[in-house]
């Protein structure tokens, strides 16, 4: 139930040609408090309810609990969410032993592209693709819960 990931800005759209899978994601937050976010998500044809705890000092590791729910339930819960629904397409790209998830945002966060890679440990080495930009791990401005209330276009 622990998530270890690093986040990066993306400096080019070269990742698109390397992608082996993509999904549209629409998500909202029933609670966006950084100490315990509660997210409702529709990813492709599936619904999810996710609870995330506060991250450690580096922002790399935090508790994450997720369960699949019927899409119809997720659709009923989304209108109950706080303002600022996140709309994005997620591309999955394999690089070495890792999969990068690259989110291309739409709506109020259009223009933002973020890559994440999940790791087994905080010090795990991984191959960095050429399109990977500056690291933003631990920068709360790039958390989806923050973006839902403070859209990228308003920065």
Image (spheres, rainbow, N blue to C red):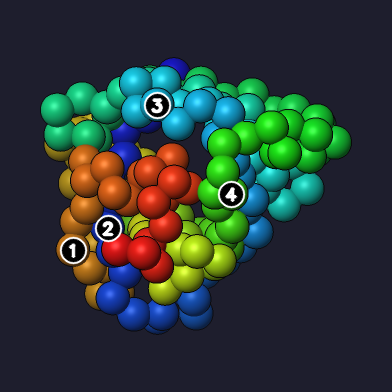
Instruction: State how far apart marks 2 and 3 are (Cα).
Output: 23 Å
* Mark 1 vs mark 4: in front: 4
Nearer the observer: mark 4 or 2; the answer is 4
Residue found 59% across the figure and 49% down from its top: 85
In front of the other: 88 or 119: 88
User: What residue sits right under mark 2 in the picture?
Assistant: 8
Q: Residue at x 22, y 46 (%)?
A: 139
Q: Secondary structure at mark 2?
A: strand
How many residues crowd around disc 2 within 10 Å: few (fewer than 14), some, or many (20 or more)? some
Say whether disc 3 or disc 1 marks the residue closer to the N-terminus: 3
The residues tagged by marks 4 and 3 sit, at their Cα atoms, a distance apart of 15 Å
Distance between the Cα atoms at labels 1 and 4? 26 Å
Q: CA distance from mark 3 to mark 1?
A: 26 Å
Q: Residue at x 28, y 76 (%)?
A: 11
- Tell which tag, 2 or 3, sits nearer the viewer: 3
Q: Which label was assigned to residue 134?
A: 1
For mark 1, give the secondary structure. strand
Q: Which residue is mark 4?
A: 85
């Amino acid at each position: 139930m622990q998530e270890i990931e690093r986040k990066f800005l993306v400096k080019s759209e070269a990742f698109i040609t390397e992608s082996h899978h993509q999904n549209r994601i629409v998500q909202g937050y029933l609670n966006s408090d950084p100490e315990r976010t509660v997210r409702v998500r529709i990813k492709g044809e599936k619904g999810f309810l996710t609870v995330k705890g506060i991250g450690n000092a580096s922002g790399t590791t935090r508790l994450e609990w997720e369960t699949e729910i019927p899409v119809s339930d997720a659709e009923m819960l989304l209108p109950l969410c706080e303002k600022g629904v996140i709309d994005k397409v997620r591309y999955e790209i394999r690089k070495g032993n890792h999969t990068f998830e690259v989110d291309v945002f739409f709506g109020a966060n259009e223009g933002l592209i973020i890559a994440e890679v999940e790791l087994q440990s905080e010090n795990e080495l991984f191959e960095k693709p050429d399109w990977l930009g500056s690291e933003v791990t631990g920068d709360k401005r790039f958390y989806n819960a923050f973006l839902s209330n403070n859209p990228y276009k308003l920065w």
